């Protein structure tokens, strides 16, 4: 061991020669010091970058020395591409029992009406409604849609909506057979086991 090293280094070196645990403790404390230094450096570097990136505001005495730029012409305010559509008629009724009815008609030929009421579905309650709406398309044709909305979903009906293809005859016969066929034996045994009282 070199005798010119500072006493703290000599004591650490001596401790390392005598005990591996002392070496681990010193190693861990060195890691901690290094991690602390890196954290402080990262914070300081982030502050420096933030200060450099922040736009500098001219001081009042600097503003007077700078020539003023000519005012930029202002763009005209935006105007709607189409004029607003007036409401020709409006009816809105809500009753205490949860039923309602509304309808409106716009000056552009748009019409809508809907009525609905509460419905008990098992232990839950829900809203069922039906109605219709119509509008004039970009092609000048009037499109009309009537619909119902209940526990089974939203069901629109209209001439312009796509329709599903017909079910092929073979699949239709299979579905009819499955609706009338007896359940498989596995299902019957499972149901019987569930119905038997447990002892």
Image (cartoon, rainbow, N blue to C red):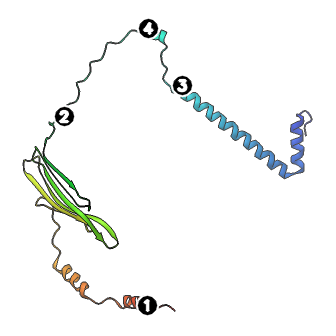
User: Residue 107: which disc?
Assistant: none
Q: Between disc 4 and disc 1, whose residue precedes?
A: 4
| Mark before the other along the chain sequence, 4 or 2 | 4
Element marked by disc 2: loop
Q: Which residue is mark 3?
A: 52
Does residue 38 sit above or below 76 in this rendering?
Answer: below
Q: CA distance from mark 4 to mark 2?
A: 42 Å
Instruction: Report x, y in % for residue 9.
Output: 86, 38
- The residue tagged 1 is 193
Binning the other alpha carbons within 10 Å of mark 1 as few (below 14), some (14 to 19) or many (20 upward) gives few
**Camera-nearest residue between 69 and 10:** 69
- Residue 161 in sight from this viewpoint: no
Answer left or right for 125 relative to 90. Answer: right
Count residues near mark 3 (Cα–Cα under 10 Å), then give few for <14, some for 14-19, many for 20+.
few
Give the labeled residue for mark 2. 80
Task: Pick out the residue farthest to the front.
Answer: 96
């Amino acid at each position: 061991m070199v005798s010119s090293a500072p006493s703290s280094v000599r004591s650490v070196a001596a401790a390392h020669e005598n005990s591996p645990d002392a070496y681990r403790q010193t190693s861990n404390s060195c890691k901690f010091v290094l991690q602390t230094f890196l954290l402080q450096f990262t914070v300081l570097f982030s502050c420096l970058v933030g200060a450099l990136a922040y736009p500098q505001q001219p001081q009042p005495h600097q503003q007077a020395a700078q020539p003023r730029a000519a005012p930029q012409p202002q763009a005209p305010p935006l105007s709607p591409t189409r004029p607003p559509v007036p409401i020709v008629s409006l009816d809105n009724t809500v009753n205490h029992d949860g039923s309602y009815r509304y309808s409106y008609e716009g000056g552009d030929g748009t019409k809508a009406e809907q009525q609905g009421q509460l419905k008990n579905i098992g232990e839950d309650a829900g809203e069922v409604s039906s109605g219709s709406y119509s509008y004039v398309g970009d092609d000048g044709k009037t499109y009309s849609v009537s619909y119902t909305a209940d526990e089974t979903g939203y069901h629109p009906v209209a001439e312009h909506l796509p329709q599903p293809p017909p079910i092929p005859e073979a699949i239709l016969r299979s579905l009819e057979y499955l609706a009338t066929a007896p359940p498989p034996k596995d299902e019957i045994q499972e149901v019987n086991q569930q119905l038997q009282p447990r002892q």
